[in-house]
């Protein structure tokens, strides 16, 4: 295989794998939106806090990995429940900007809480997987990316099934569609809001562990949250398959731009290329590739 | 979600994140504002820098009663490493008659340089900022000792030449510069390009956009190029990802050299074992084994006034910060020999900075012998005669592994002087005659 072709395949494989890891973070965003209609601008900070809890348990308190992972999952699920109960429930029925501002404020608080309460500086988050990449011909695949992609696909499939086939999942979709009708049908709306935030906690915990291993844990971990927006706008705010497709598109576009365009223009295209796509998507198909088109009678 | 919602959100966040300031200046004190970034994406770097300044100024105040009896009043203002917030901090604190400012950001430095002559406040960008401002004939108010980015880049090439067996062995070798796509990251490029032309090595420049948490494609290009050496000019999260990616592509880590802002504990710890062997440039030693650290423990930490955690004293950026603070206070001390032991004006301190001469003997008295090389400033040369070294990460700590390397001053200085003319023209400056001031 020629050098150019193998470079292309390397970019593509990396784009697809990293894209699936973006999808995992985007899934947390989609779960909340799908069930509660709320837009969570603190998704990156959820991931960061999960990283802080896991790395703190491992490196500061000396806990074994399984305890650290369990602690992260329990903490984030509990946090999701408490957050919904204490803050977000009070915002039900308020304008959407109230929830947006509340989650922005929450993001700022979380960025301070991690370093202040758990540890300052940067800590590694080691996982018992090899560092050396797997070689498939000219393509090399870092094990952490393979693990991240596997976890993402498993959760995306699991949540896809949950929303399509399970009673609770269908009830959550009903809540998202119309809270008043769902309530009239006997669905405990507030309970399902709590469940949605707890599910986001699970996804964020896993995202924090995987991305924490990849990047190290400090406040910068929250920056992965920025990738969520082009992913969910492209895929559709309320679509789980959309989170996968959006993630894959963003991952591939970033890598192609960085590999082929950046060297000629001195950099800069990798990060804005997904946002160009996002703007185009908003102009052409504002509800995303798989998003639900809402038609309002006026 | 719509555009209006997003805009409202962004405006609210910008207002909420504004800089914060405090307290008033007592009589008989000199005021030094500290533009810090303890929050934001660069906080892991900003915290040790801020802590070092706090601890050193507290040491001077509590152990010595200030500089020759004049206490240093200092106050932090949070910039989040954001240029606009940094300038706001400067403008707010300017009213307290500061004598100098350490911007701790190349972006903020660029904005403060034009203000310095009018405000008569010394700008000290120690090892960062605008390289051209090292020409004191054009930029009397700006100092960037102990070294500039350009001198550093030339010292890196000199180190590579030493490792390869001589300057002539560089011919045909491939060197890649992976840099933060910002004015800071690009600073070394002109020097590297000149040296590539002069010495015949093949230079490839690869930009990484802020913040740099996903740079696999860049490193796939590095893998394809298969260079002999890699030089990295990064900051924040970019550094730790770059080190991890270099390890992930299987590149020999002892041939990856960061600049001195790409060689801290935060840059290597996340990569774990993969970072072993990674090198970086530096202008000072790491660790807490110097007498100054024992003094800081005794006079600051044992009294419960330490800014950092005790175990973090001696980190690379902490040490850099106490050296920066030491150079500032030594310039104050020198200025007082001429102008008296009283609070200085900006102009008096500027004289102290320009005539600073930190000898080996003085470093020993300060408890910093071996921590950095002696340093001497002149009217013309505001980066001084600083030298660089290479440090290496062994998986647990940084260790200096090279001799002190003299930068290629014969290459750097003429380019620096030419750049100073260009930059000074933009600001409408007139060159002063240093001979008349001696």
Image (cartoon, rainbow, N blue to C red):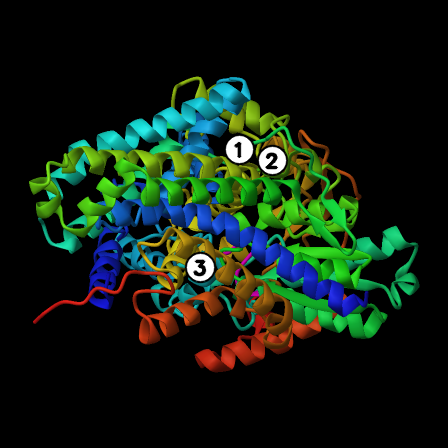
Pointer 1 or 3: first along the chain:
1
Near mark 1 (Cα within 10 A), the count class, few <14, some 14-19 or many ≥20, is many
Residue corresponding to mark 3: A246
| Span highlighted in magenta in the image | B124-131
Q: CA distance from mark 2 to mark 3?
A: 32 Å
Residue corresponding to mark 1: A123
Give the side of residue A102 with respect to residue A10, left or right. Answer: left
Image spot of residue B141 (x, y percent)? 47, 64
Chain under callout 1: A
Secondary structure beneath label 2: helix
The answer, for residue B384, to whether it is visible in the render is: no
Secondary structure beneath label 1: loop
Q: Quadrant of residue B3?
A: bottom left
The answer to which of A191 and A95 lies nearer the viewer is: A191
As displayed, is residue A276 above or below residue B322? below
- Quadrant in the picture for the N terminus of chain B: bottom left
């Amino acid at each position: 295989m020629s050098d150019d072709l193998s470079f292309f395949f390397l970019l593509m494989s990396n784009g697809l794998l990293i894209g699936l890891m973006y999808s995992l973070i985007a899934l947390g965003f989609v779960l909340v939106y799908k069930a509660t209609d709320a837009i969570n601008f603190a998704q990156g900070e959820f991931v960061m806090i999960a990283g802080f809890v896991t790395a703190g348990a491992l490196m500061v308190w000396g806990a074994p990995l399984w305890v650290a992972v369990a602690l992260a999952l329990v903490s984030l699920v509990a946090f999701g429940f408490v957050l919904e109960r204490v803050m977000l429930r009070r915002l039900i029925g308020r304008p959407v900007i109230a929830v947006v501002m509340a989650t922005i404020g929450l993001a700022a608080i979380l960025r301070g809480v991690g370093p202040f309460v758990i540890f300052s500086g940067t800590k590694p988050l080691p996982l018992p997987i090899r560092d050396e990449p797997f070689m498939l011909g000219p393509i090399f695949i870092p094990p952490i990316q393979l693990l991240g992609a596997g976890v993402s696909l498993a959760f995306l499939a699991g949540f896809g099934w949950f929303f399509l086939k399970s009673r609770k999942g269908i009830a959550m979709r009903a809540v998202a569609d119309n809270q008043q009708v769902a309530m009239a049908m006997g669905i405990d709306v507030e309970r399902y809001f709590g469940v949605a935030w707890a599910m986001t906690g699970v996804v964020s915990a896993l995202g924090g562990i995987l991305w924490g291993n990849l990047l190290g844990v400090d406040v910068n971990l929250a920056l992965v949250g920025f990738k969520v927006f082009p992913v969910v706008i492209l895929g559709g705010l309320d679509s789980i398959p959309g989170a996968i497709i959006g993630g894959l598109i963003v991952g591939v576009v970033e890598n192609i731009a960085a590999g082929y365009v950046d060297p000629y223009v001195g950099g800069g295209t990798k990060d804005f290329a997904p946002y160009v796509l996002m703007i185009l998507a908003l102009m052409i198909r504002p509800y995303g590739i798989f998003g639900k088109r809402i038609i309002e009678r006026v | 979600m719509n555009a209006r919602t997003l805009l409202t959100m962004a405006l609210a966040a910008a207002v909420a994140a504004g800089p914060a300031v405090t307290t008033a200046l007592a009589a008989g004190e000199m005021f030094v504002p500290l533009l810090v970034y303890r929050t934001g994406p660069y906080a892991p770097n900003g915290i040790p820098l801020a802590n070092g300044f706090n601890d050193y100024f507290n040491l001077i105040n509590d152990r010595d009663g200030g500089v020759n009896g004049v206490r240093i009043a200092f106050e932090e203002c949070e910039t989040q490493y954001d240029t606009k917030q940094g300038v706001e901090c400067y403008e707010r604190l300017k009213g307290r008659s500061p004598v100098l400012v350490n911007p701790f950001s190349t972006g903020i430095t660029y904005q403060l340089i034009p203000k310095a002559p009018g405000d008569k406040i010394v700008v000290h960008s120690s090892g960062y900022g605008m390289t051209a401002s090292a020409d004191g004939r054009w930029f009397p108010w700006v100092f960037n000792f102990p070294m500039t980015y350009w001198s550093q880049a030339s010292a890196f090439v000199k180190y590579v030449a030493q490792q390869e067996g001589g300057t002539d062995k560089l011919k045909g070798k491939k060197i890649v510069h992976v840099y933060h796509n910002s004015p800071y990251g690009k600073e070394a490029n002109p020097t590297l390009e000149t040296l590539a032309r002069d010495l015949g090595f093949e230079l490839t420049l690869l930009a990484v956009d802020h913040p740099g948490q996903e740079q696999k494609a860049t490193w796939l290009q590095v893998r394809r190029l298969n260079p002999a050496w890699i030089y990295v000019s990064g900051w924040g999260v970019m550094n730790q990802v770059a080190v991890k990616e270099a390890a992930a592509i299987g590149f020999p880590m002892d041939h990856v050299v960061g600049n001195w802002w790409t060689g801290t504990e935060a840059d290597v710890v996340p990569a774990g074992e993969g970072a072993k062997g990674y090198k970086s440039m530096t202008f000072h030693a790491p660790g807490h084994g110097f007498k100054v650290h024992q003094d800081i423990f005794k006079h600051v930490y044992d009294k419960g006034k330490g800014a950092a955690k005790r175990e973090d004293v001696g980190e690379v950026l902490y040490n850099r910060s106490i050296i920066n603070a030491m150079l500032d206070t030594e310039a104050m001390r020198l200025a007082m020999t001429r102008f008296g032991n009283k609070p200085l004006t900006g102009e008096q301190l500027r004289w102290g900075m320009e005539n600073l001469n930190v000898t080996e003997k003085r470093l020993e008295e300060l408890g910093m012998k071996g921590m950095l090389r002696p340093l001497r400033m002149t009217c013309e040369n505001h980066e001084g005669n600083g030298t660089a070294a290479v440090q290496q990460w062994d998986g647990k700590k940084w260790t200096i592994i090279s001799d002190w390397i003299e930068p290629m001053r014969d290459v750097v200085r003429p380019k620096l002087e030419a750049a100073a003319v260009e930059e000074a023209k933009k600001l409408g400056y007139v060159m002063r005659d240093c001979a008349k001031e001696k």
